[in-house]
Amino acid sequence: MKLNELTAHELHEKLVGKEVSATEITKTVYERIDAVEGKVNSYVTLTREQAIAQANEIDHRIKNGETVTPLMGIPIAIKDNMCTDGVKTTCSSKMLADFVSPYNATVMNKLNTAGTVMIGKTNLDEFAMGGSTETSYFGTTHNPWDLERVPGGSSGGSAAAIAADEAIISLGSDTGGSIRQPASFCGIVGLKPTYGRVSRYGLVAFASSLDQIGPITKDVTDAALVMNAISGHDAMDSTSANVDVPDFTKALIPDVKGMKIGVPKEYLGEGVDQEVADNIQQSIKQFEAMGAKCEEISLPNTEYAVSVYYIIAPAEASSNLARFDGVRYTYRAEDANDLMELYCKSRSQGFGPEVKRRIMIGTYALSSGYYDAYYKKAQQVRTLIKQDFEKAFETYDVILSPTSPSAAFKIGEKASDPLSMYLSDICTIPVNLAGIPSISIPGGYNAAGMPIGIQLMGKAFDENTILRAAYAFEQNIKDTLKRAPLKG
Amino acid sequence: MIISKNDVEHVAKLARLEVSEEEKEELTGQLNNILDYVSKMNKIDTNNIKPTSHVLHLKNVFREDVAKENLNREKVFLNAPEHDGEHFIVPQVIES
Amino acid sequence: MEYGIVIGLEVHAELKTKSKIFCGCSNEFGGQPNTHVCPICLGMPGVLPVLNKSVLEFAMKAGMAINCEISRYSKFDRKNYFYPDLPKAYQISQFDLPICKDGYIDIDVEGETKRIRVNRIHMEEDAGKLVHTEGYGSSAVDVNRCGVPLIEIVSEADMRSPQEAYEYLTKLKSILEYTEVSDCKMQEGSLRCDANISLRPKGQEEFGIRAELKNMNSFKGVLKGLEYEVKRQTEILESGGEVVQETRRWDDEKGVTSSMRGKEEAHDYRYFPDPDLVPIEVDEEWIQRIKDELPELPDVRKKRLIEEDGLPEYDAGVITASKGLAVFYDECMKGYHNSKVVSNWIMGELSMYLNENNMEIDECKIAPAQLAEMLKLIDNGTISGKIAKTVFAEMFASGKDPEVIIKEKGLVQISDEGELAKIVEEVIANNPKSVEDYHNGKEKAVGFLVGQIMKATRGKANPALVNKLLKEKM
């Protein structure tokens, strides 16, 4: 196998054994990018020179006898909504097409300390609003399993980059499923940590009470390694939790004997593809064969989750995106005669239709006379959804569901119908509303050969239990897992 | 209909978005679809249910009152569409 | 018809913390444009606010000094509106759960104490500054003041005259100064006041239609702006018209208010709880700790000056209205015994020079101990009261010790009987007419002769001794 096809933990062993250098790894990754990027379009910005320099420096440090830590010299792709000092951060929007951040997101500082090598910034749905990466100003990203299909979204670029071996590990962000759904569409692993586990400082906010950064990786072990690097309290983020961070790799035990897994019936109802539902039944059998106990459960308020989400997220977004006003660092319309025109034209020309639609919904939901009926109501129902989970976790260690009601759909298939696109977030949204951690791992493939993801949800700050279940499952079906067939 | 074309116009103005007639029509339809779907929330009685603004029960997060280094001017204006080296420039704001 | 006036004030005070409310930028006034800024107060993408603990404690302190209840549970909300001086296009403020509520301030109205209720005090961030460059068709934005911590103190509409509003504002300022939470400099904008004012027929319970008044940049401005509004609204009502509910801008130069309509499109601030900030919970122990830090407040201090120092109520009121003057007084009293004399000098010469030079007491070069020293020099006859005024002027200008000034300028009073006697004899010899007048019973003539002696001694002659010698020698 080529270096760029390996996982971070496999490369780490080679770096420790001095079989390869960080520079070699990085160069191999760029060779792959040169070969396939034209078809996939995972990246908005490539940071080749900076990456080679970073890799050289790592090699120098290793040569000087420095201990090789787990992510040292590992190429990473960063979703382009995380601020990187001196490198463009576009959010895949015309609004920020030329924006160079003057500071680093906290996760970037942490990754730099961990010694990763940033390959580039990956494509996303504009401002992370979407589930297909089709709303990007820089063009759609293509699914490495089938270039006619979407990679999912909004972290579609990060997921495609990993599936296409254009990076070893990556970061995504997840507001309503934006890490897990593309991971499932691309047949890889995506973890949304507990809200507050990873600092949001420097993540361009979409919906502040839901956003969370997490890893998208080739396997569960790499996800745990990235979690070790990026987790922890940050004094710059008031909503970051001041709780102990465990060593997530300690959870990687291939044993789920006695583990109680709940399978909510609401996640397998109407709208779920038969092949996806079948895959869940198969996964249940796998878990039971491994000694776990699976039972059907009910999370009765699930049916309201999409409604709640599509009020809360746009409401917060309408406020968060108000700063993109043409004054200090964004796109500015050239034909504005006065201040009002400057605002309206810059924002109308700078934002794409999906972003505008959500700003409209959110503005309406917060506007005078409607706050109680929409925003407050949504927050109250949010409480009930959260309570559903709390109750379930009194009995169950993990909750299992599909990650998405379907496998990756065709590019353009849902682009014209916003509501149907929103409804496909049904399995991932409740997790963000409740703030709990959740991981998507490959569960199998449909008849068309597209990956199907399964989702494992856990208690707040108990990423370790879902990592353990995911790891055990992964080890169990390892031999059946495939690679994206994309040829260079 | 939950939201009229006039409402769409008003909301667009609040959000500082310029929408063409065509967009207005389209948005009115889409927003009604979405809000109609969302209205299923109203099936649940939420009297006495506390709203969740924060999923974590955090409180009293502070920073100490210490002044830190400022951002240098070069970085302040790095991305500015218009500036004079000291200020960001906008079209004349008319007072009263 | 006679009309009653109803006034409520909204006062913004900048808190003098070291750093801004949600970021570590310096909170110092001034600075080159856009230098006291960082990604957070510039509203860059991805930044997050973290509350400065001192801001909360300052707000609590101000609230306690204004007799407010401190909220055990409080939170921040976003107030959404677009303006170039507001980088995030929302202001972080407090909407329905402010940090302090239900307080009051007592003011003196024609010798009576009147209680003005304070509805609430909340914390928020200040906006930046727009510089309007005349003729260029553009405005310039300076973000330095963005994120400067503010408290907004909202009174009930309890004031019944512009004078009451003025008294309330004066008292509020002195309370904030005493607690040291704000500099309260209206000309620097660290204290800002908006008012709402309405008239109603005498005897009517219901409030009339109100106008909101902005841009009153001084205490006098508040008084004059409100007085103008009373006149304007009275004229409207008397001519059978109706006051329009609107925001009006006070023009200090022209002395008029004018409508700000046009700029005022229907505001819809779309308040919602800021998801980036967590709630504040304050317990009894914390409240007590802040309470213990509260200094003696103006009302208590005034009472002490009256009861313990025997000052007249008027004097005590004037001195304690300004924390600086009150501290100066107390310090001076450490070195001198007579409170009324100290008060006379503070309210007289000292206040006069401060006003003339447009200075605050903390900029004054005279130390309280120096004034005490000077007063002692009067008592022991080293200088006369009149010379003391010259000495004081020099002290004010240079900050030198009174003894030094007296020595340098040769201002020591002539109390040597032999020396003075010679001068007295000379003056008597040169003014036989006046001496004659004196003998004819014209007491006035003495005044003239004393004047001549003072002139000859350049005012240094000990007046008591001059009188005595004159009478003896004539």
Image: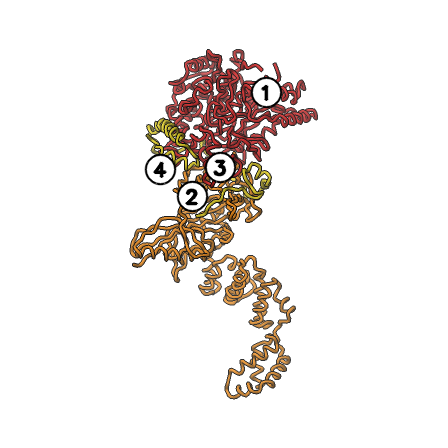
Q: Are marks 4 and 2 on the same chain?
A: no
Task: Assign the N terminus of chain C to one quadrant of the image.
Answer: bottom left
> Taking C240 as reference, is A397 left or right?
right
Q: From what the image shows, is residue C28 above or below residue C357?
A: above
Q: Position of residue A397 (x, y in %)?
A: 46, 21
> What residue type is disc 1 on?
Ile
**Can you name the residue that lies furthest to the right here?**
A64
Foreground: disc 3 or disc 2 = 3
Residue bearing mark 1 = A33
Taking A62 as reference, is C339 left or right?
left
Q: In the figure, B7 relative to C142: above or below?
A: above
In the figure, what tint was chain A given?
Answer: red
Residue beneath label 3, please? A335
- Reading the chain from its start, which is encountered first: label 4 or label 1? 1
Horizontal and vertical percent position of residue B64: 54, 42
Q: Secondary structure at mark 2?
A: loop
Amino acid on which the number 4 mark rests in the picture: Gly
